[in-house]
Image (cartoon, rainbow, N blue to C red):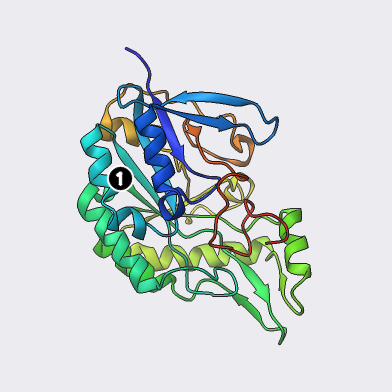
Amino acid sequence: MAVKTIISASRRTDIPAFYLPWFMTCLQKGCFRVVNPYNNRTKVVSAGPDQVHSIVFWSKNFGPFIEGEYGRRLEEMGYHLFFNFTINSTVPVLEPAMPSLENRLEQLRSLSKQWGARAVNWRFDPLSFFTSGDGKRQDNLADFPEIAAAAFDAGIERCITSFMDFYPKIKKRVQKMGGFMFYDPPTEKKIDILYQMQETLAPYKIVLQMCCEGDLLAKLPDDLSIEASSCVPGRLLAELYGDDLSLRKDTGQRVKAGCGCSVSVDIGSYKEHPCYHKCLYCYASPTGS
């Protein structure tokens, strides 16, 4: 049996929000030309429906995807779809270019209704902690209960989270913001937060998973039943769309940190596809933006 490719679209930018016409043009041509961000080598990724097992979309705004009926068009072309939808609390200083929370929750309901809740991951990511001008400690958890309730109503089964990574470019970015500073809570505080999140999710039977948090997972008490996540979940994709895919872990990701993703090919580009959400904590955005 020939093994088909999982296309990841994309960890590097938000294709559903900003680059769907480009994406569709490449599919119609039958391939993507992908530049490796580390060595600048270009490879051609075949993308015909007979070569692609499934397309995993990542986005914070599926509005253009839904409004343009891209999902219907892709299904008619013979593609199988899976969705990683990041829905965080409304915190303008962290995510200045998001649609309203109400709008995003309606998008979640639409995706779940059309493709089934098993084909949708809800990502509440990253958990962020900061101080602003008044020195008061703040976080982005305020809307978590509301989002959890809406996710339950949509049939969502998984919530994936992680604590913010302090990349050098993020530190440089916030240095320009007078009085603003991210901080990293101690392990005990993180565990307390996870208890609170699990308690919120428990009545909804939504499983809490963690992305690339292997060290923290190893320190959790036994009564915190949190799993390592797989945002490109090969076994689930096999159940949904057939087993003609590879279940190997993606060694191009942070496996040592606990990434459980199955191997896929990311077709986005940091340089050619800048993301316009301008999230303050984003590793993909240039330092100065």
Q: Quadrant of residue 50?
A: top left
Q: Nearer the viewer, residue 289 or 224?
A: 289
Identify the image quadrant of the C terminus.
Answer: bottom right
Residue at the location (65% across, 26% down)?
41
Residue 40 drawn at (x, y percent) = 68, 31
Residue at the location (35% across, 60% down)?
63
- Does residue 260 appear left or right of residue 236 in this picture? right
Identify the image quadrant of the N terminus.
Answer: top left
110 over 35 or under it: above or below: below
- Residue that label 1 marks: 119
Residue 193 drawn at (x, y percent) = 54, 67
Q: Secondary structure at mark 1?
A: helix
- Does residue 141 appear left or right of residue 204 in this picture? right
Is residue 203 among the parts visible in the rendering? no
177 over 117 or under it: above or below: below
Q: Nearer the viewer, residue 234 or 100?
A: 100
Is residue 137 among the parts visible in the rendering? yes
Q: Nearer the viewer, residue 244 or 185?
A: 244
Residue 245 drawn at (x, y percent) = 37, 23
Residue at the location (72% across, 57% down)?
287
Residue at the location (63% across, 45% down)?
271
Q: Nearer the viewer, residue 169 or 151?
A: 169
Q: Amino acid at mark 1?
A: Ala
227 over 182 or under it: above or below: above
